[in-house]
Structure formats: C-alpha cells, structure tokens
Image (tube, helix red, strand yellow):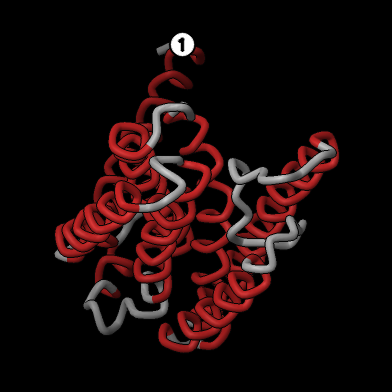
Amino acid sequence: MSRPESRARSFFRVLRSSWDLLKLELKVVSGGRTVVLGAVMLAYFAIIAVWAHLADDGWRTSAFFNSSVLLPTFVVAVVLSMGAIIGERDARQLEVSFVSPSGRYRLWVFRLVSILLLVVAAAGVLSGLTWLVIDRDHLVGTTWLHAIPPLLATVSTTAFLSVLFKGASSAGLVVAVVAGFSGFLHLGGQPMTFDLWFNPFLIGNVTDEAAWFRTMVNNRTVLLVVSGLATTFLLGLLQKRERLT
C-alpha cells in the first residue's frame, strides 16, 4: 500500500471514529431530556406567539427576539451544560469515559460539541418559527446567527463553572444570577458592549446607526471571546482532572 493511500485510510478512519463518538455523545447529552425540553420550549413559544399577536407593537421580531428565541434556548443551554461533565457519575456515564478508546479528554470535547449542536439547532428551530409566526421582515438565518454568540458563551461558561465549582447547581445559580443582572441592565434601554441580551433588531430611536453597529459588533466579539476563554479554561481543568484520576 502506498503512503498516500495509507494516509487517506487513516484520515477516513479518524473521521469515522469521530462521527461515531459524536453520535454517542449526542445520545448521552440528550438522553430523555430532549423530548421534555423540546416540548416545554414549543409550549413556551406558543405562549409568546399569542403574546405577540395581542401586543400593541404588533408582530415584530425586533420586540420579541429575546423572548421567542434567546430566552428559551438560554434555559436549554444551561440545563444541558451544567451537569454534562461534573454530573457524569450521577448519570452513570463514567463507564463510557473509561472504556472509550478515544480517551476521556477527547470524549469531553465531543460532549461539549454535542451540547453546542443541540442548542444551536434549537435556536435555528425557534428562529424559523419566529419568522413563520411573528415577523417575516427578518431572515431566519440572520435571527439564528445573532442568537449563536450569547448561547455559545452560555454553554462554555456554564460547563466551565460546573467543573470549577465541582457542582452543577452552583454553576447554574451563578449563570442565572449573571444573566439576571445583565437583563436588569438591559431594561435600561441603553445598548451596551457587555450585554447577554443585546437585541440587534431593536434599534428604537437611535440616531447614530454607525455607533449602534459598532456596539453590536463589539458585543458579539466580546461574547465570542468569553466563549473562547471559558472553553480554554474548561479544557485545561479537564486535562488536569484527567492527570489526577
């Protein structure tokens, strides 16, 4: 067998094993919670749709972006992330970690990716429903892309705090407090760079659109940086944990 053929086979073998591991982690992460969370999320969206229909400002994504897309997926992100790694003993997933030929560190990486995929998919579904039911002035892709940065920050930060505090409930409580404080500041109406609930569609009476655009870009950049830092620290803690076990 020639060297190029050997490299090609090795590449496809790694790709196949990664795909199998990803499917396994999607099952581990979702479990029986996916159906329950999905049903609750859709029921909540139905209530928001009725609210949008009865609201004085009409059916506008600009008014309901946080309520119809970001808030329900934020809850899903916290629920899935806070016990995905630290709760593996309670969920009896530790056996999978030890017998995995890929190693526990790689398995944890794929677990985090699985959570991100589920949360991003949920955001995509709600973005489509928002376009279909509430407002068609904004494209589904635009609404979906704007929901991704805060959700990435939520998933990575919650998972990191759960490992740092060695407790899922502690991580969930801290994230909820931070999100609540950010929401309280958001009610002031002044767009801020550090805002988890920044609504890019709700421009309101802003006269300087260039300044608004810079604030939006800075906000998304900060959230992505937070996601990267939290993920880096999380993987560092997991690597340290693996050496100690």
Task: Report crowding for label 1: few under 14, some 14 to 19, many 20 or more residues within 10 A (C-alpha).
Answer: few
Query: Picture coordinates of residue 174 (x, y %)?
Result: 55, 83
Give the answer, above or below, for where 25 lies relative to 11. Answer: below
Q: Is mark 1 on a helix, strand or loop?
A: loop
Q: Quadrant of the N terminus?
A: top left
**In the image, what residue occupies the spot 51% across and 55% down?**
151
Say what amino acid the circle numbered 1 marks.
Ser
Q: Mark 1 points at which residue?
A: 2
When asked about the image quadrant of residue 112, the answer is: bottom left
Relative to residue 43, is residue 126 drawn left or right? Answer: right
**Residue nearer the viewer, 179 or 2:** 179
Relative to residue 213, is residue 31 drawn left or right? Answer: left
- Seen as rendered, the residue at the extreme front is 56
Query: Picture coordinates of residue 14 (x, y %)?
Result: 40, 35
Q: Can residue 26 be seen in this view?
A: yes
When asked about the image quadrant of residue 28, the answer is: bottom left
Q: How many labels does the image show?
A: 1
Relative to residue 33, is residue 18 drawn left or right? Answer: right
Q: Is residue 102 visible?
A: no
Query: Picture coordinates of residue 211 (x, y %)?
Result: 85, 41
